[in-house]
Image (spheres, rainbow, N blue to C red):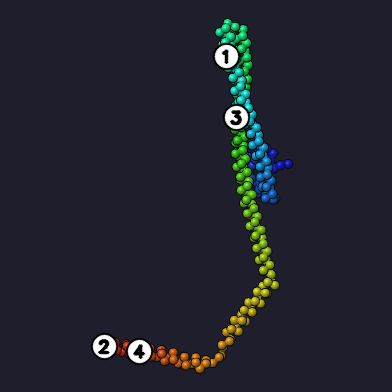
Amino acid sequence: MGIFTRVRDIINSNISAMLDKAEDPEKLVRLMIREMEDTLVEIKASCAQAIAAKKRGQRQLEEVLERAKAWGDKAKLAVSKGREDLAREALVEKRRYVERGEAFTEEATQLDGIIDGYHRDIVQLEEKLAAAREKKRVLVQRHTRAQGKRRAQENIRKMDTSDALLRFDRFENRIERMEAEADLVNYGRKPGLHEEFAQIETDEEIERELDALKQQQGGGQQV
């Protein structure tokens, strides 16, 4: 049994509400779309048949109207020739074709209403189909995100196990030992001869600059 039983069911359906109640929304929306597409094809085929019938009826109407006119002309001719009996028969034939023309006109009017109804149904069905396709797109995106989130959570749980934490702790301890060893490389080492002379030269240079500043300030006070 299909999700929908007739065109009105599709047009009046609340897609969001149906999906909210579904156990498998993605599967349901796929079924909805397939049934809507099939129904749309059927409605368009029926509409095309109605349009073809209207065109056929229009051609038949034109033919009977021409025949009615022809019998009317014959009635006039018979009257002009004094043949009222023939004129009467010609008018009877004319009336017969006129009545057939009225029937074709009535049929065309009915077909116009049917075709207009098909057109409205097609527009509404296409709107519903577009909405269902959009729902499917959103559901697929949500499903993809949910899968990604689940994989991420699974990885987090794996990383949160004691073995993983122990490995990180061992790695951190190893780095701390390497840093401590680097700090101890020059610990307690006496400065070399070149380093001591460089320090003395630096100290003497600073003393000279300091004496020069004192002399400049002293000279400024004497002025």
Mark 3 and mark 4: span between their CA atoms?
113 Å
Which of discs 3 and 1 lies nearer the camera? The answer is: 1
Q: For the N terminus, which image quadrant?
A: top right
Picture disc at residue 212:
4
Mark 4 and mark 2: span between their CA atoms?
17 Å
Question: Seen in the image, is 115 located left or right of residue 199?
Answer: right
Mark 1 and mark 2: span between their CA atoms?
142 Å
Disc 4 crowd, CA 10 A, few/some/many (<14, 14-19, 20+): few
Mark 3 and mark 2: span between their CA atoms?
118 Å
| Amino acid bearing label 2 | Val
Q: Where is residue 191 in the image (x, y as percent from the top left)?
A: 52, 91
Marks 3 and 4 in Cβ contact (< 8 Å) = no
Labels 3 and 2: the sequence-earlier one: 3
Q: Residue furthest top?
A: 82
* Residue that mark 2 sits on: 223
Disc 3 crowd, CA 10 A, few/some/many (<14, 14-19, 20+): some
| Amino acid bearing label 1 | Asp
Q: Position of residue 179 (x, y in %)?
A: 59, 81
Labels 3 and 4: the sequence-earlier one: 3
Q: Which of 93 and 108 is in front in this view?
A: 93
Mark 3 and mark 1: span between their CA atoms?
32 Å
Q: For the C terminus, which image quadrant?
A: bottom left
* Residue that mark 3 sits on: 112
Q: Position of residue 193 (x, y in %)?
A: 50, 94
Labels 3 and 1: the sequence-earlier one: 1
Which of discs 1 and 2 lies nearer the camera? The answer is: 1
Inspect this view and state whether residue 22 appears.
no
Which of discs 4 and 2 lies nearer the camera? The answer is: 4
Picture disc at residue 73:
1
Which of discs 3 and 2 lies nearer the camera? The answer is: 3
Q: Which of 47 and 79 is in front in this view?
A: 79
Q: Is mark 1 on a helix, strand or loop?
A: helix
